[in-house]
Image (cartoon, rainbow, N blue to C red):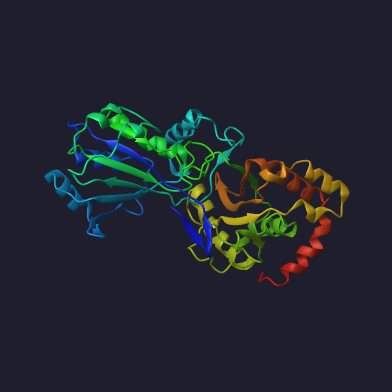
């Protein structure tokens, strides 16, 4: 799979897990089990489409059930969406994180974050493809790779054995993928599975499993006096400043704030005043902490160390906290939330940038970087406060 943006090709690859059923498992029985996987979301509802000639047409789940029970169904694609990992119950979330230990080799981010988290948005979908009976499973001995289980079933299965593919797209979470297959194996120990490796032939650092449940570190700070006071203080020091992408995926600072969740087109940024009104409205609702984060999260770009170069001591203090240049990623997320009904601000930054951010906050608190406030004040005169 390749995605294009303003003429630039963004390299990405999906992957398939192949599954064949033994004779004692019925197609609809398997589909029902797939739909019950706890990491899947009920919103949006699962969508079903089937191939008719060269076109794909919509199908109701009830119609799919009727067709599979009758043993006469077309090539079908069933799409479901995943829940955010912070929407999962504590025990389930712990089980998903535990799967990271089985990744071979471990990803570079594994175990580095003190409070690991992911982006405050998730739009990951999974597709279950059901092959029409009588067309064969299309697997041979050369395909015995990836997440293999009961591969002998692929060798012995005749052309009428039900065969499926589970497709996950670029940037999918490795732990989510393995959880899905394990859940199905646990319920149907006799199924055969294989595949699932990304385009580089592995489980780590590839384009399919490029996203990580360990990459971001979460930092919570109390709101001082009021949300407005805290936001004003953070923007005065350029610690909270939003951005957008330009051609070539370059980050460009903007006046205003881009919400983390946005449609395909970048929306108009919110002014300081408009964003603050949103924050105060959301904090006034009786919503859980994570929902509050999702509603108020903005994309931020931490200030580069060069911005503080006029003060040698500050510059050196910040520079010593930075990772090597290839590992630097100044992008992150900022949001408001509540802890035991108390308003808080939340940063989500790449784990290797946590020390840099904490040092920035300490320098701002001490007054050591007050010298940049004049420049930020002049820039913000163009904003609607």
Residue at 68% across, 54% down: 225
Which corner quadrant holds the C terminus?
bottom right
Count of numbered tags: 0
Q: Position of residue 92 (x, y in %)?
A: 42, 35
Q: Position of residue 229 (x, y in %)?
A: 69, 58
Residue at 53% across, 67% down: 267
Residue at 49% across, 34% down: 97
Q: Nearer the viewer, residue 295 or 10?
A: 10
User: Is residue 98 left or right of 57 when viewed as pictured?
Assistant: right
Residue at 53% across, 51% down: 293
Q: Nearer the viewer, residue 297 or 61?
A: 61
User: Is residue 371 left or right of 114 when viewed as pictured?
Assistant: right
Q: Nearer the viewer, residue 233 or 59?
A: 59
Say above or below: 111 vs 271. Answer: above
Q: Nearer the viewer, residue 51 or 173?
A: 51
Q: Position of residue 256 (x, y in %)?
A: 63, 65
Q: List the single residue furthest toward the left.
A: 70
Q: Position of residue 286 (x, y in %)?
A: 47, 53
Write down the quadrant of residue 60 in the picture: bottom left
Say above or below: 273 vs 211. Answer: below
User: Is residue 114 left or right of 321 when viewed as pictured?
Assistant: left
Write down the quadrant of residue 26 in the picture: top left
């Amino acid at each position: 799979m390749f995605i294009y943006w303003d003429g630039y090709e963004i390299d990405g690859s999906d992957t398939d897990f192949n599954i064949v059923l033994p004779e004692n498992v019925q197609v609809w029985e398997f589909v029902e089990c797939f739909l019950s996987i706890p990491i899947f979301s009920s919103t949006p509802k699962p969508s079903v489409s089937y191939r008719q000639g060269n076109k794909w047409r919509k199908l109701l789940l009830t119609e799919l059930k009727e067709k599979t029970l009758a043993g006469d169904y077309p090539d079908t694609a069933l799409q479901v969406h995943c829940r955010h990992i912070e929407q999962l119950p504590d025990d389930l979330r712990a089980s998903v994180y535990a799967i990271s230990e089985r990744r071979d080799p471990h990803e570079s981010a594994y175990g580095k974050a003190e409070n690991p988290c992911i982006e405050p948005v998730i739009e990951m979908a999974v597709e279950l493809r059901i092959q029409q009976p009588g067309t064969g499973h299309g697997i041979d001995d050369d395909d015995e790779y990836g997440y293999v289980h009961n591969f002998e079933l692929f060798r012995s299965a005749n052309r009428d054995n039900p065969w499926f593919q589970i497709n996950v797209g670029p940037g999918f979470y490795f732990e989510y993928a393995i959880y899905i297959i394990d859940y199905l194996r646990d319920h149907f120990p006799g199924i055969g599975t294989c595949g699932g490796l990304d385009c580089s032939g592995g489980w780590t650092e590839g384009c399919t499993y490029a996203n990580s449940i360990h990459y971001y570190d979460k930092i919570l700070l109390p709101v001082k006096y009021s949300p407005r006071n805290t936001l004003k203080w953070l923007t005065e020091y350029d610690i909270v400043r939003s951005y957008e992408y330009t051609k070539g995926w370059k980050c460009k600072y903007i006046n205003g704030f881009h919400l983390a969740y946005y449609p395909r087109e970048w929306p108009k940024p919110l002014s300081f005043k408009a964003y603050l009104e949103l924050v105060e409205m959301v904090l006034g609702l009786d919503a859980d902490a994570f929902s509050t984060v999702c509603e108020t999260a903005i994309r931020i770009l931490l200030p580069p160390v060069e911005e503080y170069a006029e003060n040698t001591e500050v510059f050196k203090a910040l520079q010593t906290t930075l990772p090597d240049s290839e590992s630097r990623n100044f992008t992150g997320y900022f949001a408001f939330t509540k802890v035991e009904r108390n308003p808080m601000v939340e940063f989500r930054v790449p784990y290797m940038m946590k020390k840099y951010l904490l040092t920035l906050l300490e320098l701002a608190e001490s007054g050591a970087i007050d010298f940049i406030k004049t420049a930020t004040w002049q820039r913000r005169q163009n904003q609607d406060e």
